Structure formats: C-alpha cells, structure tokens
Image: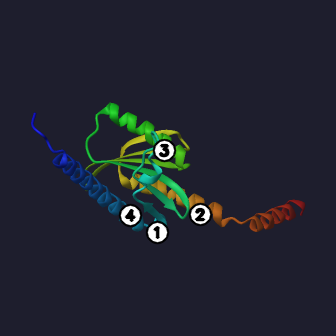
C-alpha cells in the first residue's frame, strides 16, 4: 500500500475555511456599512467572529449585533444554497442561539454571492420566522427596535414622578 500524505487535504481544508471566513467578513462589512448609513441604526455594531461563544452543542452564530452592551441579534451566514431540510435545521438551531444570547432577533443570511443575499429573520416577540426578505425590511425592524429602546431609556423615573404629579393636580382641579 502506498503511503499517502494528508498534507494536501489539510491544506485544501485550511484554504476552504479561509475562503469562507473572507466571504463572511465581506458580508459583515457590507452589513455594517448599511447599518451605519441610517441615523437610527448607526449605534448598532457587529461583533465578528464569535466562535469562542458558540462551541457548545447546537449554539450557532457567526456574529452578534450589539447596541452598546445589549445583544440585539445573532447573525448566521451561509455561503451556499441549502436544501429545505438543512435550512429548517439551521433555523431551529439559530432560534436556540437567540434564546441562549437573550437576543431579540435571529438573522440567517443565505448568501449565494456577496451582493446576492436572502435574509430570514426570527423575531422573539412574535416567535416567528419571516423568510426571504430584504435587508431593508430588517433595517426597518432594527430602527423600530432602537427607537423603542431609546424611548424607554429616555424616560427617567424623575420625569415619570413629575408627570404623575401633574396628572394628579389636573384631576384634582
């Protein structure tokens, strides 16, 4: 039997992994530019890669979308067409990741090419997937999320107490 070296196979595997990482990085860079382009979502930043957090069982995710310290979304990027059964499996695992990270959204990006992506968005508050949407729709959801969080943060306890006192004065008058 001939002695076969595994080095070419390892090299191929390493090159393939590097190509995938470069592809994912380009997608992430494009998404960050899109987020930065609108006032409402410019505070959102993408943390990539997050492999150190996702080596537990079915916890998947290539990146996290952060608003300060708050995790808004878990992002998973797939670089090839997926059969329906695999797509459903990945969506189920991404839903677990959203729960694990206590995020509001799970965004699955199915990218045939850097400029040709399909987006699948899981929303915690409605517990549903929206399939095959554009990134503009996701941007609107993220803008709404940021606006609602900012409104909650802007309302201070002192302001509520003052408002309550004013309402009571009006009702007593």
Residue placed most toward the observer, 7 or 31 = 7
Q: Are marks 1 and 4 in contact (CB under 8 Å)?
A: no
Assign a secondary structure to mark 4: helix
Residue at which label 2 appears: 150
The residue at which mark 4 appears reads as: 32
Q: Are marks 2 and 4 in contact (CB under 8 Å)?
A: no
| Whole-number angstrom distance, CA of label 2 to CA of label 4 | 20 Å
> Can you tell which quarter of the image residue 64 is in?
bottom left
- Proximity of marks 2 and 1: CB atoms separated by less than 8 Å: no
View extreme (left): residue: 2
Separation of disc 2 and disc 1 at Cα? 13 Å
Local crowd size for mark 3, using a 10 Å CA cut-off: few (<14), some (14–19), many (≥20): many
Alpha carbon distance from label 1 to label 4:
13 Å
9 and 70: which is toward the camera: 9
Judged by depth in the image, the label closer to the viewer, 1 or 4, is 4
Residue to which mark 1 is pinned: 39
Q: Secondary structure at mark 1?
A: loop
In this rendering, is residue 170 above or below 129? below
Mark before the other along the chain sequence, 2 or 1: 1
Give me the C-alpha separation between circle 1 and circle 3.
28 Å
Is 92 positioned to the left or the right of 81 in the image?
A: right
- Across and down, in percent, residue 157 comes to 75, 64
Q: Which residue is mark 3?
A: 97
SS of the residue at dot 3?
A: helix
């Amino acid at each position: 039997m001939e002695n076969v070296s595994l080095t070419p196979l390892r090299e191929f595997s390493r090159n393939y992994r590097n190509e995938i990482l470069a592809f994912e990085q380009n997608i992430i860079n494009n998404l960050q530019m899109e987020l930065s382009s609108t006032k409402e979502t410019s505070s959102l930043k993408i943390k990539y890669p997050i492999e150190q957090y996702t080596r537990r069982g079915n916890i998947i995710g290539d990146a996290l979308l952060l608003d300060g310290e708050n995790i808004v979304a878990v992002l998973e990027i797939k670089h090839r067409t997926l059969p329906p059964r695999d797509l459903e499996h990945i969506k189920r695992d991404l839903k677990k990741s959203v729960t694990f990270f206590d995020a509001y959204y799970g965004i699955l990006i199915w990218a045939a090419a850097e400029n040709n992506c399909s987006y699948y968005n899981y929303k915690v508050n409605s517990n549903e997937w929206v399939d095959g949407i554009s990134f503009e729709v996701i941007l609107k959801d993220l803008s709404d999320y940021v606006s609602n969080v900012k409104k909650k943060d802007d309302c201070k306890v002192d302001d509520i107490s003052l408002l309550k006192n004013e309402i009571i004065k009006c009702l007593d008058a």
